[in-house]
Image (spheres, rainbow, N blue to C red):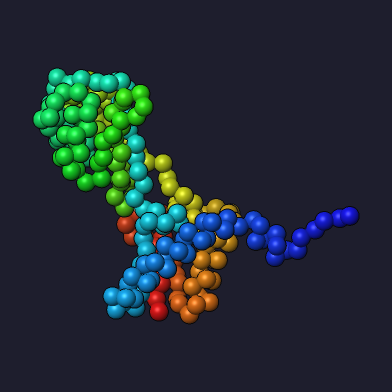
Amino acid sequence: MTYYINSTQARSTARNDLTIFNEVNYLMSQVITVSQAGGYNVTVEDGTLMTESTPIITITGTVANPTIAGNTFIIAGSTITLGVTGNNLNSVIADINDAAVDGVVASKNVSKNLVITYTAPAASAWEVIVGAGNTNTELGFTDNITHTATDPSSTSYFNAWQGNVDDESKRDQMNEVKKYFTNLGYTAERVTSTLTGRTFKWQITW
């Protein structure tokens, strides 16, 4: 017996339904929040797979379980004083996190290397520089290196929307999100993010 599916079933199978589900649910949660506050439109420029504009950069030191003698670590243009709570790895992590530099979080991996995660702001360049602090060698970092984020999936959706790449799957997913809100009576549009220039934001009006 020959088994077949029709074109509608084939298109439905090709969709990543969980991606559409997650996008719609996040957008709808924003709609509900804004409407309850008396608003009539919402713009979502980050926070979803299709709109992410603040990717995370991970930087890992090469020295395991370091002990420091120096006292400065420089990242994102901010100089952090180390050695305040001690000279071991846990103290370094505490001092970096206590400094509360925007986007910077310190932790350690299972090999006891220092791990810095940096949430890059929405901008045309997603990058961060580790400056020439006097603890770099002890922690396993190189002076004045620019670390750049891997482009998030949102850039692929943007390029598919703009026609820069031929990706029918992503176009179909975005169209399904738009159709969902249109069918409920909303106006849902994609607009290029002026912050990044390579991602879009959803604008939903009711």
Whether residue 158 is visible, yes or no, is: no
Question: Which residue reaches farthest right?
Answer: 1
Asked if 89 appears above or below 149 in the picture, the reply is above
Query: Is residue 10 found left or right of 167 in the rendered image?
Result: right
Residue at x 35%, y 23% (from the top left corner): 111
Q: Is residue 84 visible?
A: yes
Which quarter of the rendered picture does the N terminus lie within?
Answer: bottom right
Residue 19, x across and y down, in percent? 52, 56
Placement of 44 over or under 36, stated as above or below: above
Nearer to me, 125 or 116? 116
Q: How many marks?
A: 0
Instruction: Judge by depth and name the residue closer to the eye, 88 or 104.
Output: 88
Q: Please state the horizontal and vertical placement of residue 94, each as a whole percent of the image.
A: 19, 34
Q: Quadrant of the C terminus?
A: bottom left
Left or right: where 157 falls relative to 191: right
Q: Is residue 204 left or right of residue 68?
A: right
Residue 117, position as x, y percentages in the image: 31, 39
Determine the residue positioned at 31% across, 52% down.
Answer: 122
Measured along the vertical axis of the image, is residue 139 above or below residue 155?
above
Q: Nearer the viewer, residue 80 or 84?
A: 84
| Residue occupying the point 37% across, 63% down | 44
**Where's residue 179, x and y in %?**
54, 71
Considering every residue shown, the one lying at the far left of the view is 84
Which residue corresponds to the image point at 33% horizontal and 70% vertical from the top-left?
33
**In the displayed structure, would residue 142 be above or below residue 38?**
above
Q: Quadrant of residue 93?
A: top left
